[in-house]
Image: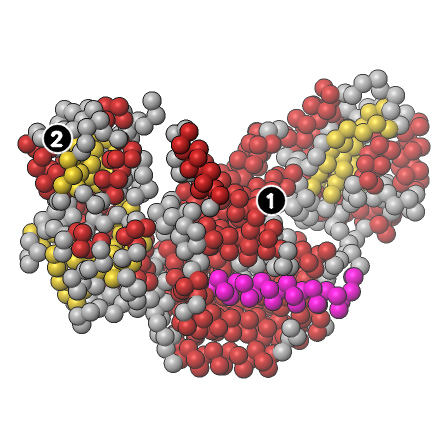
Amino acid sequence: MIASEVHGVLAAIVDISSPKGAPWEFLVIFATLLLGPVVIERARIPGIIGLLLGGYVIGPHGLDLIGSGNTTIPDLGQLGLLYLMFVAGVELDLNLLRRHRRAAIVFGLLTFALPMLFGTLVGVGLGWQAQAAILLGSLLASHTLIAYPTVRDAGLASDPAVATVVGSTVLTDTLTLIVLAAVAGSVGSGRSSLDVAVQVVVGLGVLAAFSLILLPLAAAWAFRLFGAERSVRYVVAITSFLAAATVAELFGIEGIVGAFFAGLALNRLVPNEGQLMDRIGFFGGAVFIPVFLVSVGLILNPAVIAQGETLKLAGLFIAACMGGKILAAWLSARVLGFSRAQGELLFSLSAAQAAATLAATIVGFDLGLFGSSVVNAVLLLIFVSVLASTIVARRASSRLGSAEHGERPIGARIVVGVGDPSLAAGALSVAVRIARADGGVVDPVLVVANTAPFAPKAAHQRLLGAAALAGVDGIVSTVLDGSVVRGAMHAGLASEATLVLVVEPPEWDAAEREEARLIGDDHQSGFPPFAIVRGTATRLGTVRTLPYAGSGDSQVLADELARRVARRTAEELAGERSDWAGRLAPSDVTFVSARTGDSTDALMPELPGIVVTTLAPAQQLE
Amino acid sequence: MPLTPRLAAIAIVLALGVAACGGTGAAGTFAPRTPDTLTVATAQVPDPGFWSGTATHPTGGFEYELARALAAHFGLARTKVVVVPFAQLVGGDLGGADLALSDITVTSERSQHVSFSSSYLSAPPAILVRPGTQVPDVHAAQALRWAVQGGTTLQRALEETIEPSSPPLVLHHQREALGALRSGRVNAVMIDLPVALAYAREAPHAYAVAAQLPSEAVLAAALPKGSGNVEAVDSALRALNADGTIERLAEEWLHTDVSEGSDEQVPALRIES
């Protein structure tokens, strides 16, 4: 009322019109992004629900601020949907899947198959056409790790049950999207089942080859070429998933499948703790994914939800989905030997329906397979499942108590201490390989003497360049300290690094030798394992290990690091030096396990290539 | 919520039992007024590009073929056409038809009388002129003599966006406005872009499309207010869009791809000075 009066007064004075156009639409959408989660979270309801409800409020069934003919918001929402699936793939912890492979496969298959079966049967019972019934089953079969932050904050991230669910997400989302691809390929095409199957199989094959082989190579090349430009790295990631989505659509497969595959493909290149992931998460969490959720909310129609048919559908979906998820969690807990509370964790983490469910639902809607009743019923399912997931996760977490934080893999966070950036290439390349194997991140640290009269900006820039060339995604920083070794170790301690690599100083004076020896010997200091690296090759050749005299303490570290760099068990140099010395090329990497007591005398100055001398006590390793 | 597999099993069995009793289709259920027949209302036949032939014997056109595609989607054997004046259609009287396909632009006012489906075509207002007339900007447009069909969104677009220097000729029917343009009584007619393109293609010696106005206007099917068929028609239109039917029909009958927003070949009218 007041607004209209003010508008009237102003209109009498100056030429003023009703708000419209792009700025107005963006104002409405961003105000919704701002207020939706804030308001709903006051009621302790997850923000995702606030965004969906916000979409309804501004949409054609609410205040009609965004009309039904608007294409801007749905187009942005489409980008958000691709972004959502890309993030789902890129942030998955593939190491957890690897380490808990068996449990993840058992649970993944059960938590996919049971809701899939029950959902499909519900659709068939309702008399739906086969594609709609199968799509319904598949969208109930996926899950989104909405409650993961709750259990992670409770210190349960490394609990086997949690690791099992996180690992199984790769399986359930992939299977869901494959079913979606098959269903979408068969709708309206008028082709035989065999034709559709061939199309989908060939399409998925090409997509997998593009995403899992070509894309990582291209992205790694682009990161090396443009790596120093932070914004360019981000755009490379965006371009990657859009390219994969385009390739998918060339074969009649939904773009979200391509985006998800792109996420899996770049998983190793984009470590979860790296800067690029931080940026991807920031823009996704702040804009793209919320816009998608708001665009879904535009479809929300209370008049449709209140209809008996919609409520009936919602009840059936909830029963089929939650029932299937509970049975899968219960069966898996028995088969895998988990406790009751761990079984509840399995359920709570796999119950929430959001990302893939919404994606598949919207695709089904766009294809005309689902009407607005089904979409609104699915939105009710999402609401109920997210609430159930959050509540059960809190309860199960408190019952399990604060678990011990699990061991982090050796490559989770690597600090590379550098005195002279021109010598850092070899250490950075080795660090990147180790970190990539563990889904970790590398933080280069320029160490300058604490007596330096000014900040060495030029050296910092050179290190930035070397880091970009090596594909490093961590933060490059500068510290002042008494020596490179001590500066690197202090930086490693401060950032809770799992490994410190120190670039061998050109002038390795007696004081630094003594310092390295002391750190290597100091089992009680809390310092992470560390190694000295010499060599400037950027492309790594053959990886080998060289056990040095009496070097039992760091043998395990050398073997572990070598295995990660070589991506298999590294060859051991045995016998007399004359037997193998001639085989070592300048780009080869040799891991020397030295005895800490005389470590600094054992840096093998005569060895060519990159030499990594490990100095950590074995018991510090995982 | 404790893990209660027994409760879960009971819920699933109950759900399957309820589902087995049947329900509406996943994409909604279409119930025609006349068995096995889709009855479609439109304001005029022929209507270049959209309807050809006569009301009793329609032979083609974008909206006629769209009606046939909808009938096929719903598994209906016949398509019956009834002609109802435009004002009557947007006033909610469809003459007993299941739905109306008649270049109807979605507006909130009309939504009070009819239920609209999802859109099937973008339809920004366009300026139809005689060949050789240039309309580069709004100032040039203001100087023209205009004709427009009364009671339409086009009349509002003309009055609010162009603000002609002389009062426009407001006529009851689109064909009267076109007659005024042909006879030289007016220099320009405000008309939906897809319709304008169809006229210009059919009679290039008589008509040219000078410009289009920025707009989010869309064409949609109109159904009787509160019809239970809206969800099914919505889903069917999305399906026809997804499988390329609508795009194909637009290319075949309107000779242009207007399904994804404004037509690139028609310049946008410069509004800012």
Density class for disc 1 (Cα within 10 Å; few <14, some 14-19, many ≥20) is some
Amino acid, disc 1: Gly
The label shown at residue B186 is 2
Residue beneath disc 1: A281
**A10 to A377, vertically: above or below:** above
Q: Chain of mark 2?
A: B
| Residue A313 image offset from top left, x and y in percent | 44, 71
Q: Is residue A295 visible?
A: no
| Residue A514 image offset from top left, x and y in percent | 93, 32
Instruction: Estimate the spatial distance between the alpha carbons at disc 1 and disc 2, rounded to whole Å.
Output: 58 Å
Residue A386 falls inside the magenta stretch: yes
Amino acid, disc 2: Val
Q: Left or right: A80 with respect to A518?
A: left
Residue A486 found in image quarter: top right
Q: How is the image coloured?
A: secondary structure
Marks 1,2: beta carbons within 8 A:
no
Magenta range is: A378-403
Per the image, label 1 sits on a secondary structure element best described as helix
Density class for disc 2 (Cα within 10 Å; few <14, some 14-19, many ≥20) is many
Q: Left or right: A516 with respect to B150?
A: right
Query: Which residue is at the front of the view, A114 or B86?
Result: B86
Name which residue lies at 9% across and 40% down. B176
Query: Which residue is at the front of the view, A37 or A238?
Result: A37
Name which residue lies at 30% across and 67% down. B228
Image mark count: 2
